[in-house]
Amino acid sequence: MKVSKRITRIEPSLTRKMFNMAQNFNDVIDLTLGDPDLAPPEELRKAAYRAMEENRLHYSANAGLPEARRAVSQKIAKVWGKECPTENIAITVGGMEALFLSLYCMIDEGDEVIVFAPYYINYLQMIELCGGTPVILDAYDVQKGLDVSRDTLEAAVTDRTIAVIINSPNNPTGDVFSKETLYDIAAVAQKYDLTIISDEVYRTLLYDGRAHESVLQFPEAEGRTIVVDSMSKEYSMTGWRIGFAFGPQELIANMVKMQENVAACANVASQYALLEAYQNKVPNHYIVEEFQERRDYLYSALKEINLLRVQKPKGTFYLFVDISQTGYRSEEFAYKLLEAVHVAVVPGVVYGKAYDGYIRVAFTRKVETLEQAVERLQTFFDELEKGR
Ligand SMILES: Cc1ncc(COP(=O)(O)O)c(C=O)c1O
């Protein structure tokens, strides 16, 4: 059977490979996937059941239920302080589909999209699937955190550059771009007429009372930014596959046209949960508090291990740990750790060539499980140091 060149060029990610390998051990502690163990708020689950019971689960409009789009519009006013007509909003199958539809609707063969590394691997694969070329800019260091200078960014722009993707709070580093850097990105985008795709799916997972900063606060980003958001991380609803995008009407209209051909609409039970969440301003405090506790525990424990260097994450549920002093490259390290003590993590090289000295550890498991993982890590590092 023939399969397309486009899809054969794409490799399944090493994250999945690690996850699959981890399943071979029955006592494994799996800290690979960004999928938390918490349940969504009861009201949201009930809203979905009610829709099922009342036989309200039929196709919706491609862009989503009109009332759900109106609820998203209210949410946008509250979070981003913008008036956003419903024509500028598309409800999607998670943040991922919003990313894919938007890239598909803006990229022509050979167009370049700037991506900061360490990156969410799906950005690269999606850009390539759409016929574009990702241009990668390294933007993280365990000492300095997430940062990119305006000069570096400008130097990456060519006459084929059409867009730049920002992800802050950031997977995999747990860090955020400073307001100054966000401004620089907005200003460069305006200067070279680039679209900004602002992936803000971790927007609510910020700790120590930190407020979210969006690039959209700058007038330079106005009219050229598409924001991607999702319920997956905010409400721990990864499998519900519900998210949205908002931005310039022309792009959204084309994404909706594309949606007709891809999924028809996002899952309607999940759309009713979204409506409930946004209309009634359902909070997610218990999720944020739980992750903050896990972060505090894991950060202080890993910081005590000699051969590791780690920055305290400001948001998300990931720690990006510098393992370069172990002398192992990230993939080798991850395999050894899994084999020796049955703890699964993601090799940093997944997030960019420059990050082969890192691993990503997701604190998507409860503190007691993290304590066990840390004990195992300590055993692993004791053995490592003995062998030196
Ligand atoms: C940076 C980033 N963007 C987007 C997504 C997509 O999330 P979803 O499609 O579940 O909304 C993820 C999921 O892990 C992510 O880490």
Image: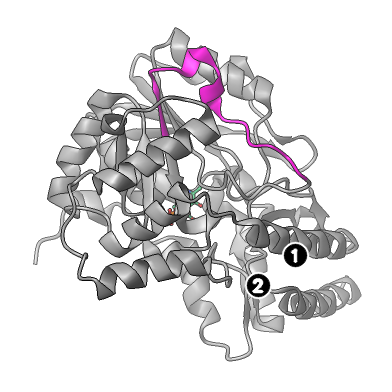
With 379 as the anchor, is 273 left or right in this view? left
How is the protein colored in the picture?
Answer: one colour
The quadrant of the image that shows the N terminus is: bottom left
Q: Give residue 333's position: percent from left, percent from top.
A: 67, 67
The quadrant of the image that shows the C terminus is: bottom right
Q: Give residue 158's position: percent from left, percent from top.
A: 40, 16
Residue in front for this viewpoint, 40 or 369: 40
Q: Write the start and end of the magenta stretch as one range.
A: 209-227
Would residue 318 be counted in the magenta stretch?
no
With 247 as the anchor, is 303 left or right in this view? right
Query: Is residue 340 in sight in this rendering?
Result: yes
Circle 1 sits on which residue? Answer: 294
Q: What residue is drawn where x is 46% and y is 54%? A: 277
Kind of residue sitting beneath label 1 = Arg
Circle 2 sits on which residue? Answer: 365
Labels 2 and 1 touching (C-beta < 8 A)? yes
C-alpha separation, residue under disc 2 versus residue under disc 1: 8 Å
